[in-house]
Amino acid sequence: MNNNQKAIKDSAQSIFSELALFSNAVTDFQKKAREISKEEYLTNEGIEAKTNEAKAYLVKRAVELSSSISLSLATIRKAAMAMEESFVISPELQAAITLTSAAGEKLDTSARDRMWKQFIGDNNALRSLKALFDSKGMYTKEMEKYIFNAEDQCNDLESSALDFKIQPGTNLNQTVAFGQKLEKFCELEGVELDKPFIQYLNAEDYSQFYTEQLRTAFGI
C-alpha cells in the first residue's frame, strides 16, 4: 500500500473501533428499554419518560460519534483525492498497456483479470486500461465496479456520518450499514484492512444485529 492508502486504512480502522463502542451503547439502550417496558408499577407515561431518558443518552453518544468520525473522514477524503488526482505511468502500467496492445483479445479472462486487479485503488490506471480494453473489444464487467468518483464516495460517507447526529437510530442497522459502506470504500481504494468491520463488534452486539435482521426479514 502507498502512503495515502495507509492513511485511509488507519482512519477507517479507527472509525470501526468507534462504531463498535457505539454499538455497545445501542445494545445497552435496547436492553434497558426492554427492562423498562416490563416494570409493572410504571404507567404508560412513566415508561415513555424513562425510555426517552435512556434514548437521550444514546442520542448524545450518536452526536459525539458523528463529530469524531467526521474528523477521520476528512483525513480519508484528503488521501482519496490525492490518489484521484495523481497519475503516474508506472513500469507495471506501461507493461500492461504494451501487452494488451500487442495481444488484444488473445489474452484470456484469467490473464486480463490478473492484469487489471493489480491496479485496484488507482482509478486513473484502471480508466486507462478500460479504454484500451474497450478499444480491443475486451469487455470486463467486474473491472467497472472498481472505477469510481472518489469525491462522490467521500460525500456519501460524510452524509451518512452526519445522519448519526440528525437521525440517530435506536438499533444496529445504521451503525453496521455505515461500517460496511466504509469497508466497501476501502476495497475500492485498494486498502487491505486487518479484519472485516463486522469482526469489530462483540459477540452480544453481533447477535443482536443478526436477530434484528431476521426480524426484519420475517416482518416480526
Image (cartoon, grey):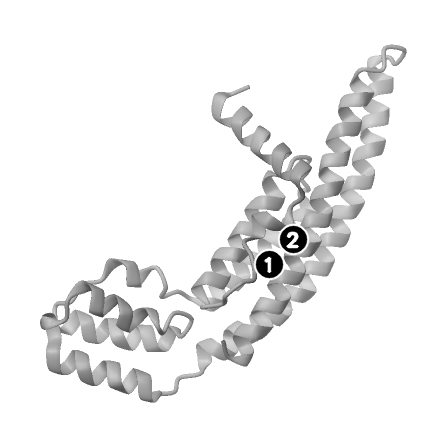
In the rendered structure, the answer to whether residue 165 lies left or right of residue 199 reads right
The residue closer to the viewer here, 143 or 135, is 143
Q: Which residue is mark 2?
A: 162
Q: CA distance from mark 1 to mark 2?
A: 6 Å
Determine the residue located farthest toward the right in the rendered image: 41
The reply to whether callout 1 and callout 2 are in contact (CB within 8 Å) is yes
Q: 10 Å neighbourhood of mark 2: few (<14), some, or many (≥20)?
A: some
Residue projecting furthest to the left: 106
Can you say whether 51 is above or below 5 in the image?
Answer: above
**Above-or-below relation of 101 to 157:** below
Please name the amino acid that badge 2 sits on. Answer: Leu
Residue in the foreground of this view, choosing between 51 and 117: 117
User: What residue is disc 1 on?
Assistant: 158
x and y percentages locating residue 213 in the rendered image: 54, 31
Residue 132, compared with residue 57, is above or below; it is: below
The local secondary structure at tag 1 comes to helix
Which residue does the image show at 29% across and 71% down from the upper left?
116
Q: 52 or 2: nearer the eye?
A: 2
